[in-house]
Amino acid sequence: MYQYRLEKVAKVFGRQQVAVEGIDLEVQRGEKLALIGPSGAGKTTLFRMLNCTLRPTSGRLWVNGDEVAELHGKRLREVRRKIGTVYQQHNLVPRLRVIHNVLSGNLGSWSTMRSLLSLLRPLEVELAYGALRQVGIAEKIFSRTDELSGGQQQRVAIARVLIQDPDVILADEPVSSVDPSLASAMVKLLLDISEQTHKTLLINLHSVDLALAYFPRVIGIKKGVVLFDLSPEKISDSLLEDLYSGHLPDNQQDKVPDEEPSSLVYH
Ligand SMILES: Nc1ncnc2c1ncn2[C@@H]1O[C@H](COP(=O)(O)OP(=O)(O)OP(=O)(O)O)[C@@H](O)[C@H]1O
Ligand SMILES: [Mg+2]
C-alpha cells in the first residue's frame, strides 16, 4: 500500500514562480527516505503539498489511497491529522510549560488550548509523559520551554508530533540549527521512533552526510524536479556535484584556509 503517490505534481506560485516542476514519486507505507538538494529546490514546497496544507497547481497526489484534490472539510482534516510535520523553526511557545507545547499537537484550535491551560486532566498528563519519554526528556514535562536547551526544545517539537500519532512524519530540516553530533542523534531518534511505531518518515536534510549515512533511499531535488532517487551507495560524488552545481556548500563559503571540512553541509 502506498503512503504517497505523486504524478507530475507541480506547484507554481503567482504567475511564473515554479517551485515544484513535475514530480513523480511513490512512497510505501513505513518507508524512510531523505530528500536533499540546494536551497530553493522546492523541498519545503513539496512537503507542504505532502502534508496537504498546499494544493498542487497541477498533477495528481494520493495520500494513503485518497486523492487529495477530492478531499474537503472533515475528511481533509482527518487526513491531515495523520501527517505530523516537524519544522526547523519548531514553532513552540517559549513561555509555556513543556507539557502544554506537547499537548498542543493534539488540538485543533487555540481556544481548546486556552481551556487546557487552566485544567490538566490526568489522561493528558499521561499522554504527554509518554511522548516525552519516547524522546528521552520525560523529566522536563513541567519545565518552562524557554529554559530548555536547543536540542531539548527540538525533542519537545518531536514529542508534539508524536502525540498526534501520525502515520507519516515529515521533518523539514529539523536539525540544521543544532551541532553535528546532536543533529545525528536527532536523526537517529526520528528513525528509531518511526521504525518502532511503523511510521513513514520523510526528512529534508541540508547535511548530505547524514542523509547518506542513515537512509536507505535518498532523493536529490533540484529546480523542482527529481534528479535522482537512489540507495546511498549508488550516489556518486559527481551526482552530488550536479545536484549542487551553482551552489557552494556552506563550509566552502566561509572556509578557513588549510582546514579540512569535517562534514559537508549544503544550502
Ligand atoms: N509562498 C511562496 N510564494 C512565492 N514563491 C515561493 C513561495 N514559497 C516558496 N517559493 C519559491 O519556491 C522556490 C522553492 O522554495 P522552497 O522553500 O520549496 O525551497 P527549499 O528547497 O525548501 O529551500 P531551502 O533548502 O532553502 O529550505 C523558491 O524559489 C521560493 O522562493
Ligand atoms: Mg526549505
Image: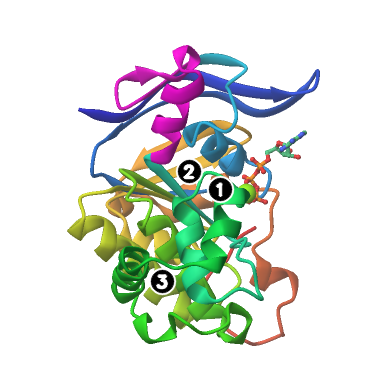
Camera-side residue: 31 or 155? Answer: 155
Q: In the image, which disc is placed on residue 242?
A: none
Q: Secondary structure at mark 1?
A: loop
Magenta region: which residues?
60-81
Instruction: Give the number of the disc on residue 37.
Output: 1
- CB of residue at label 1: within 8 Å of ligand 1? yes
Q: Is residue 62 magenta?
A: yes
Q: Is residue 175 visible?
A: no
Quadrant in the rendering for residue 74:
top left
Q: Earlier in the sequence, mark 2 or mark 1?
A: 1
What residue did someone put label 2 on?
Answer: 220
| Image side of residue 217 versus residue 207, left or right | left
The label on residue 186 is: 3
Q: Secondary structure at mark 3?
A: helix
User: Which mark sits nearer the N-terminus, 1 or 3?
Assistant: 1
Amino acid tagged 3: Met
Looking at the image, residue 175 sits to the left or right of residue 209; the answer is right
Location of residue 256 in the rendering, given as x and y in whole percent from the top left corner = 71, 84
**Circle 1 residues within 10 Å: few <14, some 14–19, many ≥20:** many
**Quadrant containing ligand 1:** top right
* Residue at the image point whose x is 21% and y is 55% from the top: 197
* Placement of 161 over or under 128, stated as above or below: above
Residue 35: x, y in percent?
Answer: 46, 47
- Residue 168 x %, y %: 35, 44
